[in-house]
Image: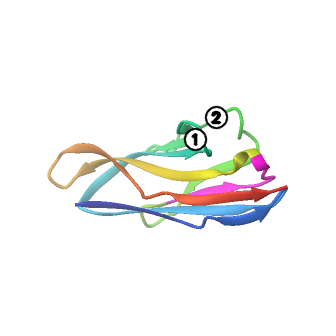
Amino acid sequence: QVQVVESGGGLVQTGGSLRLSCEVSGSVLSVNRVTWYRQPPGKQREPVGAITRGGLLNYADSVKGRFTISKADDKNTYYLQMSSLKPQDTAVYYCNAAVTTTFQFEHEYWGQGTQVTVSS
């Protein structure tokens, strides 16, 4: 079993910052990629950015220069640092982890999501 748990969401004013965390645990041999997604109210889920096992990063154009993805040095915890937040960043944020399990299976796992609300 693999668990993916997000935390750190909340209410913030326009221009503020938040840091989301994504902890990947369980029968994990390696975390190959972590992708952050978000789903604004009434809209489809969209990718925000990703980090690979080798440290490659990419971001959606809408968040470039404002959001930063990183990984803790000694554990499978990933972060989404969000700055200069705008009301249009309001969404449920999800973490998706592409994992090789200890049973040599490759599979993607989703967290439960965390709400981010940016007030104007």
Q: In this view, does 30 lie to the left or right of 67?
A: left
- Check residue 113 for magenta coloring: no
x and y percentages locating residue 22 in the rendered image: 48, 60
Task: Kindly identify the amino acid type of the residue bearing the numbered disc 1.
Answer: Gly
x and y percentages locating residue 32 in the rendered image: 37, 45
Q: Is mark 1 on a helix, strand or loop?
A: strand
Residues under numbered marks 1 and 2 in contact, where contact means CB atoms less than 8 Å apart: yes
Query: Which residue has dot 2 on it?
Result: 60
**In the image, which disc is placed on residue 49?**
1
**In the image, which disc is placed on residue 15?**
none
Q: In this view, does 50 lie to the left or right of 3?
A: right
- Say which quadrant the C terminus sits in: bottom right
Task: Bin the neighbour count of mark 1 within 10 Å (Cα to Cα): few under 14, some 14-19, many 20 and up.
Answer: many
Task: Bin the neighbour count of mark 2 within 10 Å (Cα to Cα): few under 14, some 14-19, many 20 and up.
Answer: few
Separation of disc 1 and disc 2 at Cα? 6 Å
Residue positioned 22% across, 52% down in the render: 101
Q: Earlier in the sequence, mark 1 or mark 2?
A: 1
Residue positioned 59% across, 61% down in the render: 20
Viewer-proximal residue, 97 or 55? 97
- Considering every residue shown, the one lying at the far top of the view is 61
Residue positioned 72% across, 39% down in the render: 64
Which of the 4 image quarters holds residue 117?
Answer: bottom right
Query: Which stretch appears magenta?
Result: 78-87
Q: Is mark 2 on a helix, strand or loop?
A: loop
